Image: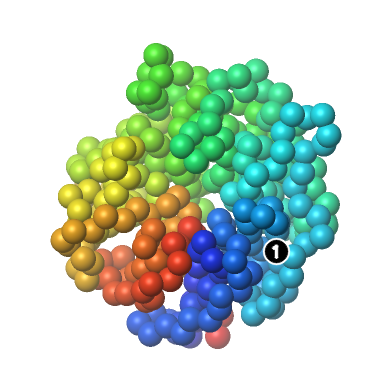
Amino acid sequence: MPSVRLFIGTRRGLFVATSDSSRREWLIDGPFIEGYEVYHAVVDSRDGQTAYAAANHSVWGAHVYRSADGGASWEQLPERPSFPAGSGHELRAIWHLAAGDTGRPARLYAGTEPGALFVSDDSGASWEWVRSLEEHPTRALWQPAKGGLALHSIQLDPRDPELIYVALSAGGVYRSDDDGRSWMPVNDGVRADFLPDRFPVAGHCVHSVRLHPAAPDRLYHQNHCGLYLSDDRGDTWTEISDGLPSDFGYVIGLDATDPERCWVIPEESSHMRAVCGHRLRVFETNDGGASWIARDDGLPQEHVYVSVLREAMATDGLDPCGVYFGTSTGHLFGSPDGRRWSAIASYLPKILSVTAVVDPT
């Protein structure tokens, strides 16, 4: 039977939770990378054991950490994404990491603050700034959001290694069809209510974008101004916020076997940034956002003032699909079926990211 590992990035390091396929009892280890804010952690699906973490520290700066043993131990890589002298940019944080395709086993991507994409072809030993995105004609429309100008949500089409999506806050969603040599903004139909032009080509505050692995033309997109769906690789977007208590939120969790099923956690507003109605509810759709069901069994329903950040929800893809999320108050919740919830951990440091990995027997 398979087992499940959760990589839990927090403001004070990385924790690892493990469970068997029942996903009801969990063993928590850590913290690793102590004292660092771990914005994101990934396990390289090409070997199932190599893991990377985006770690940021107010004094020692931003670094990439690597584990060769599935997260049992970590080492800081000697090199990190960096901007050349005279570029006018200085690395503030690493927000997102993504492993490349199987044909390039050493390919790794990193998204940073300020908003930039970096690529490594030697497993993080060196990094190259993808200047084609920085030099895009719409670059002047990018602006710092509340968390700074950052690039996140790097998504790769499993059918085509040259097809890449990235999202920026605030900049928008961009797609490259030629391995990053050129880019196009793909924001048609997405609102930007905070701008004079409500439907601009770029300048959108994107919170997260997820590509469905079983139907790669389908993307889900949680924006500052709505939840959206695309079935044409981002060329056009349809809003699917109806039926939710708010159009604002950060996270999207996908059922890897069912393109119609996903989970979101709406929040009250960009001002409050807390769950709606002071109740912790996860909303599930089984029809691609045409309707939504509140899943709150096992979750607190009174005086809840927490947020769930963009990387802080994960799914495991098992049958039934397990769903996990962490809160700004350090509480980690899980469900083996996406419907009934229990607390996996309480009183961790503020949770910034959750990643689920399924291991064979």
Q: Residues within 10 Å of mark 1 (few under 14, many from 20)?
A: many
- Residue 251 position within the rendered picture, expressed as x and y whole percent measured from the top left: 40, 50
Residue at the image position 63 percent from the left and 69 percent from the top: 33
Report the front residue among 296 and 159.
296
Image color mode: rainbow
Q: Amino acid at mark 1?
A: Tyr
Kindly identify which residue carries mark 1: 65
The quarter holding residue 271 reads top left
Report the front residue among 31 and 60.
60
User: Is 189 situated left or right of 52 in this image?
Assistant: left
Compared to residue 299, the image places residue 176 above or below, namely above
User: Is 160 situated left or right of 355 in this image?
Assistant: right
Judged from the image, the secondary structure of the residue bearing numbered disc 1 is strand
- Residue 141 position within the rendered picture, expressed as x and y whole percent measured from the top left: 55, 20
Report the front residue among 95 and 136.
95
**Is residue 356 visible to us here?**
no
Residue at the image position 68 percent from the left and 77 percent from the top: 73
User: Is 8 situated left or right of 90 in this image?
Assistant: left
User: Is 41 situated left or right of 79 in this image?
Assistant: left
The quarter holding residue 268 reads top left
Residue at the image position 69 percent from the left and 49 percent from the top: 109
